[in-house]
Image: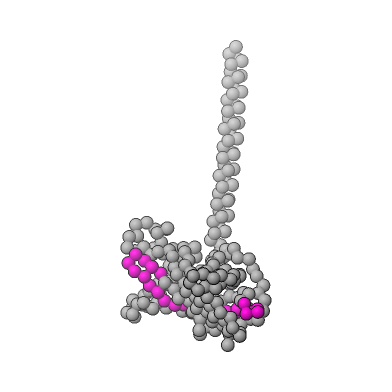
Amino acid sequence: MKTITLALFGILLLGSTLILSGCSKDETAKKEDSYKKNEKTSTQQTAGTETKTPPVTPTGNKIAVATEKSKLEWSGKKVTGQHNGIVKIKSGDLYVDNEKITGGNFDIDFTTIEVLDLKDSEMNAKLTNHLKSDDFFGASNFPTGKFVISSIESVNDDKGNNAKVNGSLTIKGITKPVSFPAKVSVNNGKVSATGEFTIDRTLWDIKFRSGKFFENLGDNLIYDDFTIKLNLAAGA
């Protein structure tokens, strides 16, 4: 009787050990799979460029952007106020077919960032250099940004805009889709376009004093929304 009891106890003990061992292996495998997935996701998120706008082949005549007549105006707000300025467009081309823009792109020169609202030269230089630093646009490592037009739709809104520009904006090597309303004019080889849009700067890895990533900032908080006004000209 004792022999049978001991034998049954041994079988139960062996079975429990096998079950626990199997569970342990399963949990380990799940953790390893989870780690690999997270590692892959992390790599994808930090590897650089992400674009959701499909490539297009524009038709028509290529017209060079008139860089001396083109610029981007920027403005950013914080709890205690705001700042504004400009950044120059380095180069670019637009494609025009039958008096309509079919595509194009332009490069943004972040080394040319200017602050317009600060009249004190020392304070102005301090903010300008900070904006060029890695806290913001990282102009040393990423001197050039880019906007690529994927499509332009006809609209008619109460602000006088006649187009919706769809494209992708690259800042600090990160590309994200952007769409905004604009006033576009094409006449005898001359193109002008103006538009204003707001982006979430943190999507382009500009996280300095953002409430999403830092706590208890108080009056040092800088808002994530960043407004850009486009002034673009092309042609003779």
- Residue 11 placed where, x, y %? 61, 23
Query: Would residue 148 be counted in the magenta stretch?
Result: no
- Residue 163 placed where, x, y %? 56, 72
Q: Quadrant of residue 31?
A: top right
Q: What residue is drawn where x is 58% and y is 88%?
A: 236
Q: What residue is drawn where x is 47% and y is 64%?
A: 200
Q: In the displayed structure, would residue 181 be above or below residue 6?
A: below
Give the extent of the magenta segment: 76-100
Query: Would residue 88 be counted in the magenta stretch?
Result: yes
In this view, the residue in front, 78 or 138, is 78
| Lateral position of residue 212 relative to residue 151, left or right | left
Res. 140 visible in picture: no
| Lateral position of residue 127 relative to residue 96, left or right | left
Res. 72 visible in picture: yes
* Position of the N terminus by quadrant: top right
- Residue occupying the far top of the picture: 1
Q: What residue is drawn where x is 57% and y is 63%?
A: 50
- Residue occupying the far bottom of the picture: 236
- Residue 117 placed where, x, y %? 36, 77
In this view, the residue in front, 185 or 210, is 185
- Residue 108 placed where, x, y %? 52, 76
Q: What residue is drawn where x is 59% and y is 39%?
A: 26
